[in-house]
Image: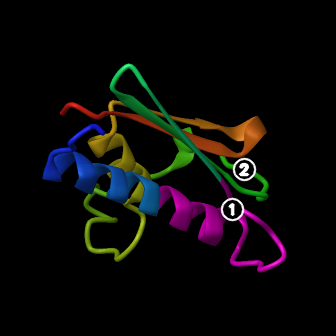
């Protein structure tokens, strides 16, 4: 329907994959009794996705920059940075335990 470019499809996979992984690992702490809800919709050539977990939430402004000298060699910690990088819009709504992003489907 949208005839996505390979780059756009890769961006969607990356943003969704990182969001889901973060919800499972950091939100739900891999607790199999907890769920992750994924909502996606497309409107006016924009894909909007929300990933909701059952964790306690976190302060998104407290995430350290993975590009800093002390963190550059660490294996993890780049998920939110990557989502921000490939998305046109990203926000974390702590009270709702929701990571939300939008990607232009025509990019």
Residue 6 in sight from this viewpoint: yes
Q: Which quadrant: the N terminus? A: top left
**x, y (%) of residue 31?**
77, 78
**x, y (%) of residue 90?**
45, 35
* Residue 59 higher or lower than 82, as above or below: above
Q: Residues within 10 Å of mark 1 (few under 14, many from 20)?
A: many
**Total numbered badges shown on the rendered structure:** 2
- Disc 2 target residue: 57
Write down the region rendered in magenta.
18-37
Instruction: Tell whether label 1 touches label 2 (CB within 8 Å).
Output: yes
State the SS at label 1.
helix
Q: Earlier in the sequence, mark 2 or mark 1?
A: 1
Task: Work out whether residue 86 or residue 62 is closer to the camera in this orientation and state it.
Answer: 86
Residue 65 in sight from this viewpoint: no
> Residue drawn at (72%, 50%), measured in percent from left and top?
57
The label shown at residue 27 is: 1
């Amino acid at each position: 329907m949208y005839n996505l470019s390979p780059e756009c499809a890769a961006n969607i996979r990356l943003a969704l994959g990182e969001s889901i992984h973060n919800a499972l690992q950091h939100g739900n702490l891999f607790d199999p009794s907890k769920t992750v809800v994924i909502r996606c919709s497309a409107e006016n050539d924009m894909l909007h996705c929300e990933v909701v977990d059952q964790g306690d939430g976190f302060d998104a402004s407290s995430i350290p920059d993975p590009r800093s000298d002390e963190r550059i060699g660490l294996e993890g910690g780049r998920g939110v940075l990557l989502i921000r990088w490939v998305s046109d819009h990203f926000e974390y709504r702590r009270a709702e335990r929701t990571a939300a992003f939008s990607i232009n489907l025509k990019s």
